[in-house]
Image (tube, coloured by chain):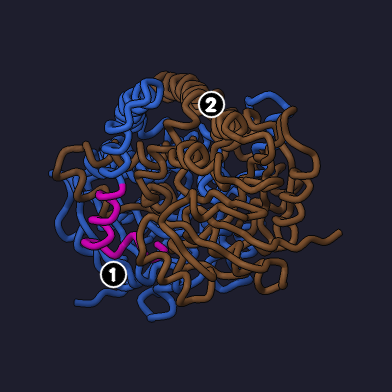
Chain colours: A brown, B blue
Amino acid sequence: MSFFIKRLTVVGLGLIGGSLAQALREQDLVGEVVGVARRRRTLEKGLEMGVIDRGTVSAQEGVAGANLVLVSTPVCSIVPMVENFAPYLAKGAVVTDAGSVKGSIVRRCEAKMPEHAHFVGSHPIAGREHSGVEASIPSLYHGSRTIITPTTNTQPQAMEFVRLVWEAVGSKVETMDPDYHDRVLAATSHLPHLMAYNIVNTLSDLEDDLRGEVFRFAASGFRDFTRIASSDPTMWRDICLENREAIVEMLNRFRVDLEQLTKRVQEGDADGLFGKFARAKGTRDRVLAENKVLRGDS
Amino acid sequence: MSFFIKRLTVVGLGLIGGSLAQALREQDLVGEVVGVARRRRTLEKGLEMGVIDRGTVSAQEGVAGANLVLVSTPVCSIVPMVENFAPYLAKGAVVTDAGSVKGSIVRRCEAKMPEHAHFVGSHPIAGREHSGVEASIPSLYHGSRTIITPTTNTQPQAMEFVRLVWEAVGSKVETMDPDYHDRVLAATSHLPHLMAYNIVNTLSDLEDDLRGEVFRFAASGFRDFTRIASSDPTMWRDICLENREAIVEMLNRFRVDLEQLTKRVQEGDADGLFGKFARAKGTRDRVLAENKVLRGDS
C-alpha cells in the first residue's frame, strides 16, 4: 500500500510537525508542505531549513487545498485551531493532531468537521530534548509508537490513511479508544510527571538550611525525579486541564496507596513494608522480562 | 597527615567493606585485613580475591586485636552486631559503620562501647549495580561523599582517624549531626525510593487489561521511577524501620502537597497549576546552576 500527499499543511510548526514533513519529503511521499505558525520567525526558519515550501500565519489560508492537515499545536490550542480553519478545508481533506490527550479533543474536533472532511486523532510518542522547528529531524519517528484513536464516527479510509502516514515515517501504530488512551497516559506519563513536580516542591518547602543540604546530597533516585520536573510548565498545565478526569483518578489511587504505606512506616510494620517493596520489585522484574520497552529509550 | 592500620576488621564482608579493604591495601595503608561474614562462601571468595587475609564467622573472634572495625552489615544488624562484639574490642580500637541511617544507630552503638574503644558513625554514599564482596573494587570511593556523624560523646582523635581513612580512599568527607543526616537522607533518598515503590504498586493495581497497556506504554518518566523500585526490598524495609520518624515527616509533607495539587487539577485551576510546575522547574534549574552534583553520577 502506498500513498502520495499532494499538499501537507502543518498547523503549529515545531519539532513534531517539522519532523513529519522532513521524513515524508525524504521518501518523496509529499508534494508541497505548507507551514502555519504564529510567529513569522518560525516560518522563516522552516523555509530556510527546507522543511516547508511556504508559510503563513493564517491557518484558514494554510489549510486551503491541503490533503492532509497535521495540527501540532499545544493541546489547549488544538480544538480552537480546528474550529477556526474547519470551514476552509478542501473536499476529502483528512485532519489529524498530535496531542498527548485524546478523549475530549477528539470528540470536539470531530464535531467541528464539515461534511466533506475527516478527523482522526493521533498521538505520536516521540520527542527530543530540544523543541521547535529548528530541532526537527527526519528520523524522529524511527522506532517510535503512535497511538491513533478512532471512534464510531471515524471514516475507515481516513483512519487507514493516517496509519499509513505514521508507519511510513517509521512509527509502530496502534489503535486505542480515546478515553482509554487518556487513562493509560495518565498512569504512565502524567502521574509520574506530577509526582516529580510535587517532590521537588515538597523539598523546596523544607526550611532553608535543610534545603541546602537536600539539593547538595541529591541522590540518584532524586535526580531522576527532578529530571522530568524540568519539563515545560505550560505544557503540563494544559495536559492537566485537558485530561483532568483521568489524572485525578490516578492521583487519588496513588494517594490511597501512599496513606497505607505511611501507616506501615509509622507502625513499624516490617512484614507489610517488605511485602509492598517486594511486590513492586517483582512487578518491575516481571515487566522487564516480558517487555523490553522499559530497557531502551523511547 | 598519615596513618597505618595494623589490623582492619570488616564485619559484614560485601561491596562496601571489601572495597574499603582493597583501596587501603592498594595504598599500603593496612597490614592485615580480617573478614567476618555469616557464610563461609563469602569468606572464601574474599580470600580468593585477596580482599581479606583471613576470615571468620565469629565477630567476637574477628575484632580481636583490630585497630579499626568497619561494620558494613544491613542497617538493622549494626546495633546487635556491635553489642555482640563490643566486649572483645582491643584497647584504643575505633569502630565505624556504613549505615544509611544514623541517629538511633549512632546513639545505641555509642552506648555499647567499652571505655577503651570508640565509635564514630559513617555513611559512605557509594554503590554499584552489583553487590557482594565479588563486586568490590578499590576505586569504589573515588569521587564519592562520606558523611560522618559525630556527637558530643565522640572522641576527637577517633573522628579524625575515621575522616582520614575515608579521605585516603578518595571520598570527600563532611560532618553532620546524626539526626540531621537522617532528615536530609529521608528527603533526598528515602522519599524518592518510597514514591517509586508506591507508583509501581498503584499501577499494578489498575485492572488487568489496563495494566498491560500501562507497562507497554511506559514512558521515560515512568522508567526512571521503576528503576529505583528495583532496589532490595529487605534493605528498604530496614531503612524504613530505622529512620521511621524522618521518613514519616517527609511522607506527610509530600501528601499535603499532593492533596493541594489534586485539588488544583480537579478544579481546573490553570494559574495554580502553572505556578506549581514553574516553581518546581525553577528550583531545579537554579539548583543545577548552583550545584553540579545533579549532573553527574554519584
Residue on which the image places disc 2: A246
Residue B283: in magenta span? yes
Please report the residue visible at 55 percent of the width from the left and 60 percent of the height from the top: B55
Q: Height in image: A26 above or below A226?
A: below
Give the camera-side residue of A162 and B23.
A162
Numbered disc 2: secondary structure: helix
Left or right? Give the position of A82 relative to B212.
Answer: left
The region drawn magenta spans B281-298
Please report the residue visible at 40 percent of the width from the left and 65 percent of the height from the top: A42
Please report the residue visible at 37 percent of the width from the left and 49 percent of the height from the top: A232
Q: Quadrant of the C terminus of chain B?
A: bottom left
Residue on which the image places disc 1: B167
Marking on residue A116: none
Residue A78 placed where, x, y %? 49, 41
Q: CA distance from mark 2 to mark 1?
A: 51 Å
Numbered disc 1: secondary structure: helix
Specify the subunit that label 2 lies on: A
Give the camera-side residue of B246 and B26.
B246
Left or right? Give the position of B48 relative to B22.
Answer: right
| Residue A30 visible in rendering | yes
Question: Which class describes the residues within 10 Å of circle 1: few (<14), some (14-19), or many (20+)?
Answer: some
Left or right? Give the position of A63 relative to B115.
Answer: right
Number of numbered discs = 2
The image quadrant that residue B257 belongs to is top left
Q: Looking at numbered disc 1 in the image, what kind of residue is underneath it? A: Glu
Q: Looking at numbered disc 2 in the image, what kind of residue is underneath it? A: Ala
Residue B146: in magenta span? no
Q: Quadrant of the N terminus of chain B?
A: bottom left
Residue A49 placed where, x, y %? 49, 76
Residue B170 placed where, x, y %? 33, 72
